[in-house]
Amino acid sequence: MNAPDHPLLAPLAAGDRRAVARAISSMENASAGWEAIAAGVASRLGRAHVIGITGAPGAGKSTLINALLGELLGRGRRIGVVAVDPSSPMTGGAVLGDRVRMGSHGAHERVFIRSIASRGHLGGVSRSTRRIVDVLDAAGFDTVIVETVGAGQSEVEIIEIADTRVVVCPPGLGDDIQAIKAGILEIADLLVVNKADLPGAEVTARELKEMLRLRAGSRADVSVLKTSATRGEGIAALVDLAQAHATAHGTGRRLSLRHQPTADEVAAVDRAIVSRRSVRRFLPRVVARETVEQILDVARHAPSGTNTQPWRVHALAGEAKDRLCRAAAAAYDSGEQAPEYRYYPAQWFEPYLGRRRSLGWSLYGLLGIGRGDKVAMQAQHRRNFLFFDAPVGLVFTIDRRLERGSWLDYGMFLQNIMVAARARGLDTCPQASWMEFPHVIARVLGLPESEAVVCGMALGYADPDAPEARLAPTREPVSAIAAWAGFE
């Protein structure tokens, strides 16, 4: 299902609480459709101010959040809360319930609270926390508060999610500050000594300020504040400081710090790109429709000017593919070419002529086709219109009223298809030759006059034993294609 068609997106954008709850459940459980929801909300993200609340157990984080809810409600805000709890050893779910933790504010119409299980994920949050924050952001909540599990100095993953990180400390830390300062204290935008009505709060606040002063490279904008959540003291000041931080540093931090790829992930993408080749002989191995749909689902995320998405794909297999191939091959045999557009220049010139000849003679050499053997050359070209015997043939069309920019966008979409196919162990051959017979394609596929044929593409599993499988076209080095300026 395409993202714009997902039934939850419209009510979610309108702030419907049931839609929010269902979308969050989908994200948390990675159930069917969660990727469509994630894609559908992407354009609505970045408005909410995300506040991360972390700190050692016993610091009073939940009570502090309850007090913050009251203050934010008084300022007219809509607030979403994501409370990450330890997982139940019996069910795997969150140990504590949603509204029990935040008191009376949990039932307010402008408050949405969701407890989620960490499910063993380290870092103080769950694997789905970032996606759940996205749902609340897209649903129009002004402020989203994320409370971490609170297991100690390792709980620093909140730095990648929250715009403003609040580290809550209980009074009387003393020497414990030395033990934890290498972790959560160092990620703070705001340091809060909660339970300030208890003995030792003043000393703890002073020690935190001293730690900031002595620490090399410490940021000058980190404030230390005392609060008493049960008494409501210091809460308004905390909200003021958090909002001032958002004004100064902006919101949407998590969007600019999306998952940083590992070396293995980078290598996988590079391998898919570099190993892509134009395959001209395929195995008679079926490719499931589900696989083709997955490839197209990935490819549709290609960029396009003002999101016009000018592509339309006609995926063919079995008799539907064979019917088109028979018609195109017959038209080729009878010389009925009527090209949709001019693909190559009318007059070749260097260096392009040399590259073209090199590839052609290399391919013909592997196939045993000698120079001047036009019959064999034409027979090889004819195989284009059989999709080189691939099990799947793709025909791409575009609204002919669109301009050159949309054709440039189309190239990025096609590349995505080829790379996504390669990542799944399949191979492709992009075929401009299909644009030679737009009238045949239009007749067989029933295309409207408004659709122009861009190209075709063979998709399947390469025959590794075919002679042409040894074709290895050379590519120009970066030094030959790039000009550099302004780099050190």
Image (cartoon, rainbow, N blue to C red):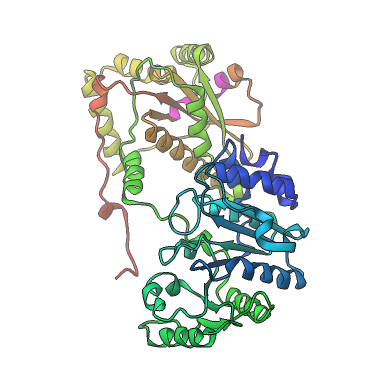
Q: Magenta stretch containing residue 44, yes or no? A: no
- Asked if one can make out residue 309 in the rendered structure from this viewpoint, the answer is no
Q: Main secondary structure of the magenta part?
A: helix
Q: Work out whether 13 lies above or below 80.
A: above
Q: Position of residue 151 (x, y in %)?
A: 46, 62
Q: Is residue 103 left or right of residue 161?
A: right
Q: Work out whether 136 lies above or below 320.
A: below
Q: Position of residue 45 (x, y in %)?
A: 61, 57
Q: Position of residue 344 (x, y in %)?
A: 41, 36
Q: Work out whether 379 lies above or below 54.
A: above
Q: Magenta stretch containing residue 440, yes or no? A: yes
- Asked if one can make out residue 442 in the rendered structure from this viewpoint, the answer is yes
Residue at (45%, 78%) from the top-left corner? 173
- Quadrant where the C terminus is found in the figure: bottom left
Residue at (49%, 48%) from the top-left corner? 119
Q: Work out whether 238 lies above or below 308.
A: below
Observer-nearest of 403 and 236:
236
Observer-nearest of 146 and 271:
146
- Quadrant where the N terminus is found in the figure: top right
Q: Which residues are magenta?
A: 432-441
Q: Is residue 351 left or right of residue 300?
A: left
